[in-house]
Image: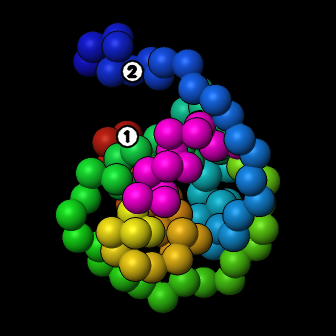
Amino acid sequence: MDIIETLWGKDKLVQKTVQIEDSLYEELVKLSENMLDASVSKIINACIYEFAQKDRLTMYQLGDLSKHSVIFRKSAVKKLADMKAKFNIPQYVILNLAIRNGIEKIKKSKK
């Protein structure tokens, strides 16, 4: 893997309170504490960037949601807004889809 692909350039950060499915947030915490050298916020940002490359979405029933404070990269917030406009669904749904997709990819790659 190329070092430039691994490291992100500087970007402005913005703190937002968002609704995240409880089970997904628990998974993010486990990944952050036990598997990855990254905060929950950094994992969420990576999930957004990865998910933004999709042309189609697969919807699923969301579980219980809780509010969490997340530090987003400004470019990740823009990607969420772009996906909201493209797919015409709420940002919190897109965010949860991105997180679920990211967690699944991380688990597959770490087996």
Give how far apart the Cα atoms at labels 2 and 1 are.
16 Å
Q: Which residue is mark 2?
A: 6
Q: Which residue is mark 1?
A: 110
Residue, x 27% and y 51% (percent of image)?
53
Residue, x 55% and y 19% (percent of image)?
10
Residue, x 57% and y 26% (percent of image)?
11
Mark toward the start of the polypeptide (2 vs 1): 2
Residue 56 vs residue 18: left or right? left
Residue, x 41% and y 58% (percent of image)?
82
SS of the residue at dot 1?
Answer: loop
Q: Residues within 10 Å of mark 2 (few under 14, many from 20)?
A: few
Q: Position of residue 96 (x, y in %)?
A: 52, 68
- Which numbered disc, 2 or 1, marks the residue closer to the eye? 2
Q: Which residues are magenta?
A: 71-82
Q: Residues within 10 Å of mark 1 (few under 14, many from 20)?
A: few
Q: Position of residue 70 (x, y in %)?
A: 72, 49
